[in-house]
Image: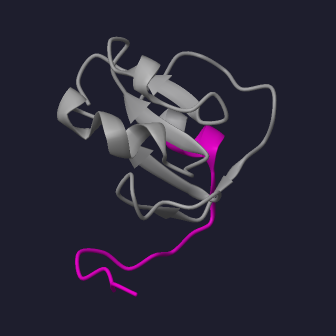
Amino acid sequence: MVTNQFFQNKGPFPLRKILKEINYKNSLSEELLIHNINDLQSADKNDITFLNSSKYKEKSLNTKAIACITSQNLSKYLPSKCLKIEVKNV
């Protein structure tokens, strides 16, 4: 298992709180807890990830993340079970 050397995980955090911090306008009907942020390949069912390039298409199609920050153009490369958080600048 790879250890993260960039930040100390202090979660879980409610996804609504994360979305508020990034000024995301859409609301959620359910309360999800995010335990970690991870890359597309390492993310599990309690993690958030991001997709910023179509060159990661294959990895994004198989991500297990519960949510992904991405652009409107790239959201089609995410599994249906992954909540797509579409922003202008990933």
* Rendered location of residue 59, percent (x, y): 36, 46
Which residue sits furthest front?
Answer: 58
Horizontal relation, residue 29 to residue 38: left or right: right
**Quarter in which the C terminus is drawn:** top left
Instruction: State the residue in front, 55 or 65.
Output: 55
Region of the chain picked out in magenta, as a range:
1-18
Magenta highlight on residue 43? no
Instruction: State the residue in front, 54 or 19.
Output: 54
Q: Relative to 71, is 60 above or below?
A: below
* Rendered location of residue 64, percent (x, y): 56, 52
Residue 66 visible in image? yes
x 48%, y 30%: residue: 78
* Rendered location of residue 12, percent (x, y): 62, 66
x 52%, y 34%: residue: 20
Instruction: State the residue in front, 42 or 30.
Output: 42
Horizontal relation, residue 4 to residue 86: left or right: left
Q: Relative to 3, is 29 above or below?
A: above
Instruction: State the residue in front, 75 or 4.
Output: 75
Overall secondary structure of the magenta stretch? Answer: loop
* Rendered location of residue 35, percent (x, y): 59, 65
Q: Which of the 4 image quadrants contains residue 86?
A: top left
